[in-house]
Amino acid sequence: MSPNNEDRRNLDYAFYNQLQLLNKSTGNNILNPVNSTQKPSTQPPAVGTINVSGANGVYQVSLVNAAQGGVNATLYNQVSYSPIKSFGESVTTSEPSAATSATFANPGQTLFFRARWSFDRVTWSSWVLAATTAVSSNLQSSAASENNTPLNQSNYSYIDSIDPSGGATVRIYGAAGPYNGYASVKGGVETAMPSASIINVAYGSTQIVSYDGEQYQLKSTLPGVFPDTWTPVGQVSVVGSGTPSLPTLTPVLSSSGGHVISATFTPGSGLTEPPVLTVTDPGGPGTGAVLQAIIAGGVMTGVQVLNPGAAYDSNTAITATGGVFGGATGGGTASGGNGGRLTKI
């Protein structure tokens, strides 16, 4: 017995709905095969390429999709990373995405990256390594921070070192001069900071200054030495101490032309910086010679002739001056734009 018209209509609607569901699940236009533009879900797409770079504690991932032979379907990807090239442990995998770029914050990590592709997020291509060597993200710096975060910090301080009798002293103070405090701005919070003097600091050293909440601390190197709760203040180089015994030099001239080709010397002592060597020819025509001292262990170990000059005679003399490390401008550039203002040492 044939079904009536209403029963047939219901069967037709049910069949049509099933076809629609099948169309969505496979990605093929079963109702209109001529316009079908997607591959079946059982076939993975062609693989693309993945490029990764790291800076300031963040990985930047860029993906390039491969051409899919005329298929105009949405292409999904997944990115995963691991400290092991074989991805045998500690693997992190992103959620499927159609985006062709991504960022991953992993400060101080060294990782391998890979990617794979899919039309339907079920059937995937093989994994493709970004590189055969691991990529470092490096550490985050204040230059990488956004405005008004705790890393956006300015210390309106001055730091210098002086050389009173008995040892070098590092001073931290504000714009009003020694023994006056300064303002520290961290994000949107401004704090009044105390001035201080740190005595008996080693001569000839570079020191990093930080505030631990109660007192100032000095360290000779920056990376990894300060807890996160400490406030970095700046950098200072500590002047040398005393008067060195300068070397004495006698020029060695060429047999013709009056060129300075070398020098004999006594090494001196207590040198913390190469002395300046000056060549003179009193009353003579000699000119143009330039020499450079080489020091090690507080003494001069050699002389480098940068320019031999010409026309020097037996009156030629070489004098040494300086030889004491006088310090260098410390500090750096703070995010807030104060330029890391520190006095010239």
Image: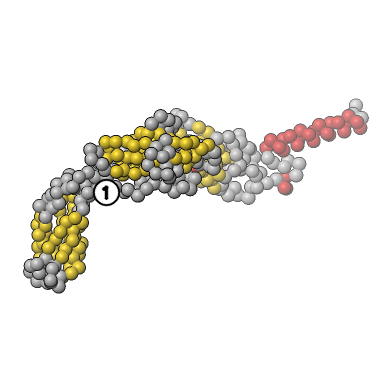
The location of residue 336, given as percent across then percent down, is 49, 45
The location of residue 152, given as percent across then percent down, is 50, 41
Please rate how many residues cluster around mark 1, counting C-alpha atoms within 10 Å: few if below 14, some from 14 to 19, many from 20.
Answer: some
Residue drawn 68% across the image and 46% down it: 37
Q: How many marks?
A: 1
Would you identify the image quadrant in which residue 97 lies? top right
Would you identify the image quadrant in which residue 2 lies? top right
- What is the basis of the colouring in this image? secondary structure
Residue drawn 47% across the image and 36% down it: 192
Q: Amino acid at mark 1?
A: Gly
Residue at label 1? 326
Residue drawn 9% across the image and 71% down it: 256
Say above or below: 2 vs 181.
above
Say above or below: 190 vs 326.
above
In the image: residue 305, left or right of residue 77: left
Task: For mark 1, give the secondary structure.
Answer: loop
- Residue 17 seen in the current view: yes
The location of residue 295, given as percent across then percent down, is 18, 50
In the image: residue 292, left or right of residue 63: left
Say above or below: 253 vs 184.
below
Residue drawn 9% across the image and 69% down it: 313
Q: Nearer the viewer, residue 48 or 179?
A: 179
Task: Quadrant for the N terminus, please.
Answer: top right
Q: Nearer the viewer, residue 318 or 199?
A: 199
The location of residue 113, given as percent across then percent down, is 47, 39
Q: Nearer the viewer, residue 55 or 216?
A: 216
- Residue 54 seen in the current view: no
